Amino acid sequence: MESEENLINVFLMLFIGSLLTVVGPSAPEEGWQVYSSAQDSEGRCVCTVVAPQQTVCSRDARTKQLRQLLEKVQNMSQSIEVLDQRTQRDLQFVEKMEVQLNGLENKFKQVEDGHENNIARQYKSIKAKMEELRPLIPVLEAYKADALLVQQFKEEVANVTELLGTLQEQLGGLDYQELHSRVTSLEDRLRACMQRLACGKLTGISEPITIKTSGSRFGSWMTDPVAPTGDNRVWYMDGYHNNRFVREYQSMYDFMTTDNFTSHRLPHPWSGTGQVVYNGSIYFNKFQSHTIIKFDFSTSLISRSRQLDFAGYNNMYHYSWGGHSDIDLMVDEGGLWAVYATNQNAGNIVLSQLNPNTLQIIRSWTTNHPKRSAGEAFMICGTLYVTNGYSGGTKVYYAYSTNSSTYEYIDIPLTNKYSHLSMLDYNPRDRALYAWNNGHQVLYNVTLYHIIQ
C-alpha cells in the first residue's frame, strides 16, 4: 500500500490556467479515486485520493496473496468438480459391473448343478463374461489415482488454511476503521490546502454523480462547509413546506449506504429548499414569513432570528418551479448570502450578504433578473449564477458579480438527469454543487478559472 506521505505528495505536473475540482465519494466497489484537485502557486495540480470504502489497496502485497489464494481455491474447486464427474461416471460403470458379476455367479451355479454335456457351453459363456469384466482393471487403477488426488487436495487445503491464519495475524492490526480514519484525515488536510487557493470564475460543470435516491420530488441536502476537521456529517431535509425534521447522517458513506440517522426537530417548519448548514447551525426561512432563523444543532435552540425586510414570501417571488422558494440562503467562500426579490426592485433578484451571527444585512446588490424566471441559483466566489430553468435542457446562463456590480450572459450546460431541479447549492469546502433532482441527491463537479495570487 502507498504510504500516507506518498499520498500527500501526489502531484500532477499540469501547467494549466484553470482549477479543476473533482468531488464525489467513491462507490464501495470502486478502487482508489481522485476526490478533489487544485492548483498551487507553482502551477502543480494537488490531488486528494479516496480509498475504497471496504477493500484493501489492490497494490498491497498481502492483497496479492489473498488473490493468489482465491485463485488456488478456485482451481481446486474446478478440479474437484472434474473428479466428481469422473466418479459419477465410474460409479455407473461399477453398478453395471455388479449386475454382470451377479450374472457370472449364476452361471457358476448352473455349472455346478448342470450336466457334463453342458460344461463346454457354460465355459464359453463364462469366458465371454470375463472378457466383459476385463475393462474393470483400469477403472480400479483410476480409482486408486483419484484417491491419491483427493489426499493431495486435503494436504493443499491444510496448507491454505495455515497460510490464511498467518495472513489474518498480519492484517489484524489494520482493520477498515483504521484505514478509513487515515484516509479521512488525509482528505481533510488536502482540502485545507485547497482552500488556500484563490477564487475563480465558473467555466464548466461535470456530469452529475448520483449519490442516493430517496425522499419526495422536492428537498435539500448539504454538508457544513466550515465544519471542523473530521466532521463530515450530511444534513437532509425532505419537502419544501410543513416539515420541521432534519436528518443527520454521520458521513457521506453512511448517507449513501444506510438509513441510520439522527432526527432534529426544528421549532418551526421551513419554507422552500434554500436552507444551509453553516458552522454548526442551520439557517432557514420560516414558513409563510420573511423571517430567517438560525438554529444551533448543539443546543437545539434558536440562537438568532431576523426578518428580511421587503423580501417577498409565500410564493410571491419564487423560482420558476414554485415550491415557496422565495428566499434562498446560500454559502460561498465569502460567507452567508440571501437571494430573494422585492416589490421595490420590481420582482427582480436582490442579493444580500448576511452576518452569520446577527443575520444583519452587510450589503445588498439589486439585479435586473426576474426572480420568477430563474430556475435555480447558487453563489461561487462572490458571483451569483442563475440557471435558465429547472426541467429539460438546463444551463447556467446569467452571472452577477458582486465584486464589480456587473452582470453577463454565459452558456454553461448543466445536465438535468432527472428532469426536475428543486435545489442547487455550492459548497466551498468541496467545491462542488449539491442538487436535489426529482427525488435524487446529486453532486456536480465544477471547473473554475482562477489566477493564483
Image (tube, grey):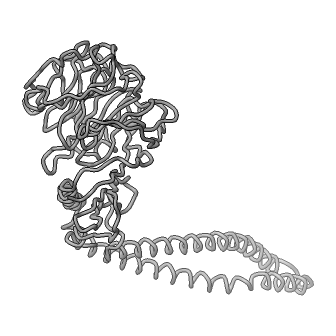
At x 46%, y 43%, the residue is 413
Task: Pick the residue in front: 24 or 162.
Answer: 24
Give the residue displayed 17% in from the left and 38% down from the top: 335
**Residue in the picture at 52% in, 35% down:** 393
Q: Quadrant of residue 325?
A: top left
Q: Is the residue 399 above or below the residue 453 in the image?
A: above
**In x, y percent, where is residue 410?**
42, 41
Quarter occupied by residue 108: bottom right
Q: Is residue 177 visible?
A: no
Asked if residue 308 is positioned above or below residue 43 in the image, the reply reads above
**Foreground of the two, 215 or 374:** 374
Residue 357 is situated, as x and y percent measured from the top left of the image, at 8, 31
Q: Is residue 356 left or right of residue 322?
A: left
148 with respect to 261 (left or right): right
Answer whether residue 129 is visible to the viewer in this image. yes
Left or right of residue 427: residue 192: left
Q: Is residue 33 left or right of residue 188?
A: right
Quadrant containing the C terminus in the rendered view: bottom left
